[in-house]
Image: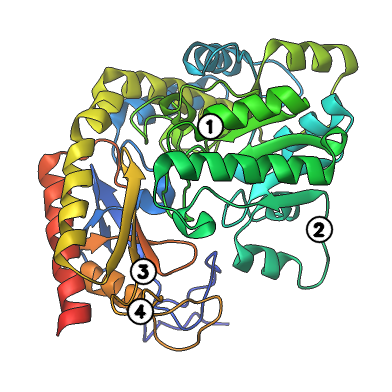
Amino acid sequence: MSRQEPTTRTKVTSIPHWYDPKNDIMTVADGENVRVRDDEGREYLDFCSQLYCANLGHDNEAVIRAMDEQARRIPYVSSAKQSPVREELAGRLAEITPGRLSHTFFSVSGSEANEIAVQLAREYQDAPKVLTRWRSYHGGTYGAGSLTGDPDTRATIERHAATSGVSKFLPPLPNAFGTDDPAELARLAGEHLEFVIRNEGPESIAAILTEPVAGTSGAFPAPPGYFEHLRDLCNEYDVLLISDEVITGFGRCGDWFGIGTEGVEPDMLTFAKGITGAYSPLAGVVIGPELAEFVGREGFDLGQTFAGHPVACAAGVAAIDEYADGVVENVRDLEPVLRDGLRTIGNEHDVVNAVHGRGFLWGVEFADPDTGERFHDPRVDEGNNPVGDVIAVARERGVIFGSGRPAFQIILSPPLIADRDDLERALTVLDEAISVTFEN
């Protein structure tokens, strides 16, 4: 059979994740620094870091070189065996994670890391339940999907098979507790969580799993004092605290880990995305000495073929060196540019209902200024979403922003190496896109 010359663009046979047949799918062909180019050569500022993970940009030679050297030494070692580079990375993680966290169980993705953390907590505590927040996102596999509070994800997963073992509590958001006062919000949200713990039965709860700063659900931080209260509740009721750092880890919030900005030590910490700067898939959970001793005594009869892949671990070691060489400081130094610029945009556009975030992770919410209602809530409304139009206009002008969960908000999460000019350019385009969408 002779091969026919294609008369149109080659047929696409890979299925994108989060696929919506109504949406135009962008093809990313190449990139450098904080920019990417599509298959027609158009260049964009990548202000979603693809999926909150290209923290070091798209052409970091140190990470690429480390991966190449490891692949030439030995590209793969069984996850059931030890590997020098795997041990090196675990040691480096013990140095930068909060407090007494000391031992790492590697996985491949953030979903799997959260599942492993929950499994360890249930085994250690001999208790079945885990508490997570509504509107949270902890992954899209069956186990991690049950942990996720995002309704769209859970509805998709549970359409044909129910998940169990997880109870939800309200996030510390002003509209959840009817107050804008940070101290009162922290108090009310903490009291609510204690009610949930007591109502579920403390002896049945293995852990609380939470993001220190919300990721795709809105980039909202907790009010001051909230996490101290949460830590005290975990201590009082003998519940483990797991910090989901899949998005907030490795500098995105201006500290090595998001929980570090709260001054609280978790019992476990999960990571993914930024560990390699997205140059290779890698994830895991870091645990403290008591849990490590438990695993050392009891064993842990679960694993994944590609967990702790040596090439990915080499990328992780190199990425940590890069983060330590001024990248985390860059986020701290330039956070005011994003914060103040977004607040200015919020003050200038009545349709911007709220701006919140930390470091290089910010959310912008939209609502009708006359009613306070969302222009479009995809959970209950059909039809066009003007927030999606803002993203589309910005993309036409050369900046890629991400959509939040739910999609009445935009998330800004640039690579951590973005400079002042990059941030100011993105802010200008966002300002223009809001004007074009809502004021023309």
Residue 227 - label: 1
User: N-terminal of the two: label 2 or label 1?
Assistant: 2
Residue at position x 48%, y 58% in the image: 178
Which of disc 2 and disc 4 is earlier in sequence? 2
Helix, strand or loop under label 2? loop
Q: Nearer the viewer, residue 184 or 202?
A: 184
Other residues around mark 3 within 10 Å, as few (<14) / some (14–19) / many (≥20): few
Hey, what amino acid is under mark 4? Thr
Q: Nearer the viewer, mark 4 or mark 3?
A: 4
Residue, disc 2: 163
Q: Mark 3 and mark 2: span between their CA atoms?
A: 33 Å
* Separation (CA) of disc 4 from disc 3: 35 Å
Location of residue 295 in the rendering, given as x and y in whole percent from the top left corner: 81, 18
The residue that appears at 43% across and 51% down in the rendered structure is 51
Residue name at image x 17 percent, y 60 percent: 347
Gap in Å between the C-alphas at discs 4 and 2? 37 Å
Regarding residue 304, the answer to whether it shows in the image is no
Tell me the quarter of the picture where residue 106 sits: top right
Between marks 3 and 2 in the image, the one whose residue lies nearer the viewer: 2
Seen from the viewer's position, the closer of residues 20 and 2 is 20
In this rendering, the label closer to the viewer, 4 or 2: 4
Task: Give the quadrant of the C terminus.
Answer: bottom left
Which quarter shows the N terminus? bottom right
Whether residue 118 is situated above or below residue 42 in the rendered picture: above
Sequence order check: which comes first, mark 4 or mark 3? 3
Q: Which residue is mark 3?
A: 26
Q: Nearer the viewer, mark 2 or mark 1?
A: 1
Q: Amino acid at mark 2?
A: Thr
Which of label 1 and label 4 is nearer to you? Answer: 4
Q: Which residue lies under the disc numbered 4?
A: 371
